[in-house]
Amino acid sequence: MAIPSSYLARMLALFQLLEHGFGALVIFAYWQLLIGSTVPASTALGVALAVHLLLSGTRIAFLLYLLRPVRRWLSLTTAERGAPEALLAASQSAFDLPYRYAFWHAVTWGIGYLLVTLALTLTSSAAGAMAATLWPATIFFGVGLGLGAYALNFPLWGFLLAPLAGELSLDRRRAGVTAKTTGRSLRRRSLTLGLALAFAPLAWVSSAVYVLAAPDSARVVQDAAGVTDYLVIFAAFSVVVLAWAPLCAGLLAGTIATPVVRVTQRLDQLRRAPDAHEGYVPISFQDELGVLASATNDLIDELGARAARITKHEQERDGLLRRLERERSLLQHLIQNLPVAVALLDRPVASIALENKAFASAAPGRLRRLQDWPELARVAGPVLAQVSTRGAAASIRGTRIRADLYVDLICVPFAGEQPQDLLLLVDVTQQIQSHEEVQEMALSAAQRASELRSVMDHLVEAVLVCDADGQVNLANESFLRMMGDREPSQLSWPIEAFIPMVQHPDGRPIPREQMPLVRALGGTVVRHQEVIWRRTPTDIPRHLMISAAPIRGEGTATPIVGAVAVAHDVTDERELEFVKRQFVRTAAHELKTPVAVMKAHAQHLLKAQTLPERLRNGLAAIDRGADRIDRIVRNLIDVMQIQFGRLALAHEQVKLRAVLEEVAERACARWPGGRVHLEVPPDATVTADPRRLAQVLEVLLDNAFEHSAEGQEVLIGCGGDEHTIQLSVSDHGSGIPAGKQPFIFRPFYRANQGYEETGLGVGLYIAREIMVRHGGTLTFSSEEERGTTFTLRLPVGGHAS
Amino acid sequence: MTDPRPRVLIVEDDPDLSSVLGLILQDAGYRTMEAANGARALQQLEQERVELILLDMSMPVMNGWEFARCLHDRYGRQIPVIVVTAAENARRWAEEVSADGCVPKPFDLEDLLASVRSVLASRGQEAAPNP
């Protein structure tokens, strides 16, 4: 509710009405009571009216002065009225005005009739004559007036300004401006007013009594008219008091009752509707009532704040509850759908309070107590007992609770309203089973490894295995013996460690990439790489024949995971070969030279013309014997060379006819009566070693003549195509017995049990080996008593390799 | 007047063979000299000129290869050489020392003489008729 600008004007108008109304009554009372007819009425009333108007003007002026902050505040717009300075100044003015102004009002009213009496005594002789009684009566009258004015004005202004002060207090609270609400005491105000109310009529009565009872009073009751005067005076007096006193009391009661009623109403309203936090009680007075109203307003604020807090707390609580509900349902969902079996057991009998799906499906049926699942109860019982005594979680790993179910069993104490235990069963069947499988596999692998190890260790050959990084980490006993006992603890070597220990057979070092294991790691299967092994430079060298192969994972397309090498010590064989080679060389030189001496002497002596027959025959026999020794030596050398793979062959264009004619001629010389029929074209040529080819034919012709009757002809035929040339040597001799046919190419298969009846029995063996090394063949067909045909086949262009 | 018969140096460590070779060649109308190894042969060559050398390859002190190298260093190819060896690969060895002929041991007397004659003939030398 806004205070209108006209508020002050209306208030002042009301005030003027009361002021002048009472003023008229008081002037009349003064004239009647104190002056009477002693002074002309016009004079007395005129002076009194003049003084009244004069003083009333000063009061209006003072009032306007006191109301200046209020007036200024009222002149402001609604928005500007919230400014703290203007608000505080206006509030203070509204609060203070009744106190300040009531006093001034009382004083001016009190001294007003002293001034009137003074003026009358000075201007009127009659008045001057009665001054002795008039002055005391006027003083009593003035005191009564002052008290009366005070008693009226104080509550009047409080009453008039209360709406303004209340409105200002509401504005202050809205603007958050604190003003002093205490300072004036209601009790003192009431007491002051009560005293004024009591003493004012007393003063008036006293003044009248004094005027009337004074011995020298002008207003002596002398007649009936005097009595009438008295009655009039009392009547006027009564009218004044009757108008004034209830007004004073009513105003006082109003200024006290209204704020109290407002507070009471508001409190009652709050009691009935605690949520009505709006609407403050206006504070109209700066006294206990103001404090009461202020306290009520604070209470309203506090209630509002509490209500807001409660609302906020309720909202928070609701949010919390919703979240709890959400989490609870999530947790329930989680527990229900966990792959772990969960059950909540009530102590002490382990009755199942809650179980999830996994537990229900694992259980043998619908369970009420843990005892209903005896296998689980047997395992979980001790754990539950341990949990209840220790108060801490306990577990068992990998226990079997069903024929096909292994679990990790975990028990956690759960301190709810009643003690419970949370039982969790984690299915570990697969892990346990795979663990068992792995163990079985490991055992079997270990057995196999042990068997393999044992086999490896009993091998004469050294075996070593390296991984893909070339680290040798498995070797057998033979290899460890090769490595010597210097570092028996070391069982792992990098391949590089062996590089200084091996050489090519010709003494060159072997670079890393040619090491057998390295080649095997590269995917090559190494067969029979020969190396010289010398663990330290001072060791006796050993000849090793090394084979190596890559090791792959399962399947051949998988990456190489390592390599294995097998080293066979061929030192003894190599030494034997060396000895044989040395023998051949020695035989060549040391046998041939004496044979040459024998032969040269024999032939030289045979040239003498005059030689006895006996001596000539002897010398010829020596010559033939030397030839036979020479042939045996040659055959031996050939056999050795064949067996060492060192038979050297020349590759020349050979005219077959020429070779055959020469061979046939020599054979016929050796075999008296022998005849050879050549059916070979003169231009037939072949790429071959002519001496070796002649040697083969010589063997075949010698064989043919040997097994033929003297004088029988041996046929040499020729055939073949553009790639192959074919020669056949046929006789009509005794043939080869069927039982001996499989063995005739065997070396040293001879004499009476063999086919070749002279020499070492190596001729056919050497002949066939020579043919094979030419890339050809030597075969035969024979029939006993019908003869034998040997067939040579040679590639025309020579042996491809 | 000098002896017109060609002189043959026999370089052979086996004294038996060396002497029989000497007998054979002398009977065939040649003059012969014998040396037990290459080093001796070189010494003899310094003293006397020869028309042919019969050379064994395996010898102590100085073998056939070393002798042939020294011979060629000092005299070039003016003196023909016939290798007489018991080795299986006699022909290859003969080629290695750039010999003019090769006679494997043991040899036929006629083969040896034929070889000597043909080498000397190719050098424009004729053996003297048998005495």
Image (cartoon, rainbow, N blue to C red):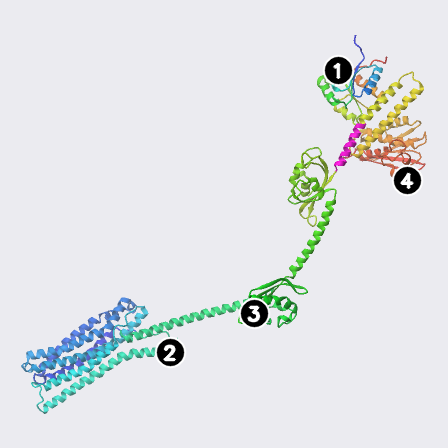
Residue A703's x, y, as percent? 89, 32
Residue A58's x, y, as percent? 16, 74
The answer to whether A735 is drawn above or below residue A408 in the figure is above
Same chain for marks 1 and 4? no
Task: Give the label, 1 or 4, closer to the camera.
Answer: 1
Same chain for marks 1 and 2? no
Amino acid type, label 4: Gly
Name the quarter where the C terminus of chain A is drawn.
Answer: top right
Amino acid type, label 3: Gln
Residue nearer the viewer, A692 or A214: A214
- Would residue A694 be seen by someone viewing this image from the given angle? no
How far is the residue under mark 3 from the one under mark 2? Answer: 49 Å
Residue A395's x, y, as percent? 60, 63
Residue at image point 92% right, 20% down: A615
Q: Residue furthest top?
A: B1
Q: Residue furthest front?
A: A389
Task: Give the label, 1 or 3, closer to the camera.
Answer: 3
Dot 4 crowding, Cα within 10 Å, few <14, some 14–19, many 20+: few
Q: Which mark is residue A271?
A: 2
Magenta region: which residues?
A: A570-587
**Quick check: marks 3 and 4 in contact, CB under 8 Å?**
no
Residue A19's x, y, as percent? 18, 79
How far is the residue under mark 1 from the one under mark 2? Answer: 161 Å
Q: Chain of mark 3?
A: A
Element marked by disc 3: strand
Residue carrying label 1: B44
Q: Which mark is residue A420?
A: 3
Element marked by disc 4: helix
Which badge, 3 or 4, comes first in the chain's sequence?
Answer: 3
Task: Give the label, 1 or 2, closer to the camera.
Answer: 1
Residue carrying label 4: A739
Residue A581: in magenta span: yes
